[in-house]
Image: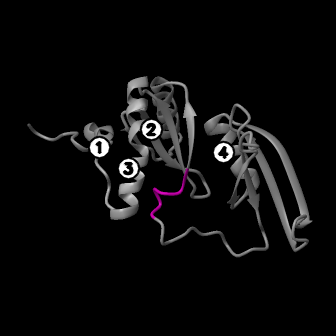
Amino acid sequence: MSIQRIHHVAYRCKDAKATVEWYVKHLGMDFVLAIAENQVPSTKAPDPYMHVFLDAGQGNVLAFFELPTQPEMGRDENTPAWVQHIAFKVDSVQKLEEIKARLEASGIEVIGLTDHTIFKSIYFFDPNGHRLELAADVGTPEMYAKLDACKWDMLNEWAQTKQAPKHAAWMHDKEFNQGATA
């Protein structure tokens, strides 16, 4: 394959400066580049924009466009808010807990720690309404091998039934049975 990695992923933002400051402050990302034009280079459309780029680690770049002449940004109302999200990897569950405490101390509402068995996650929203996930891997090689072995069976069953296959239901047993009585 000729694709090496994702060069950058771009989303819209309400305020480029506030967005950069939020990601620098809360997620420790470095602000690496700003591009601004009054015309879109690819389409030549007159549409002023500020395009900002943040270092998400290991060559991953998260970018945002502020578009002041366009209608106010919204979201796909037919897609639940939990579906579209950006997930970032952190190196440990301890780091995840530290970041969660720091976010909550800053007044940011955080969901989780959610136990996905092979990773644990927290979820929250950036100031633009984009849902973010931070995840720490905790799976074993055996768990990953088990998931790898059933991925095509799961996908094919889903394609036929549109019902959740049970091949990997063990991943969320703990999460769904929390607080359940024996």
The residue where tag 4 is placed is 22
Circle 4 packing at 10 Å, graded few (<14), some (14-19), many (20+), is some
Viewer-side residue, 118 vs 55: 118
Q: Residue at x 49, y 31 (%)?
A: 136
Q: Quadrant location of residue 26?
A: top right
Determine which of the numbered discs, if any, sits on residue 45 in the image. Answer: none
- In the image, residue 173 sits, relative to residue 43, either above or below, namely above
The residue where tag 3 is placed is 154
Q: Nearer the viewer, mark 2 or mark 3?
A: 3
What's the distance in space between the residues labelled 2 and 3, CA to CA?
A: 23 Å
The residue where tag 1 is placed is 169
Q: Nearer the viewer, mark 4 or mark 2?
A: 2
Magenta segment, prevailing SS (helix, strand or loop)? loop
Q: Amino acid at mark 3?
A: Met
What's the distance in space between the residues labelled 4 and 2, CA to CA?
A: 20 Å
Does residue 7 appear to the left or right of 104 in the view shown? right
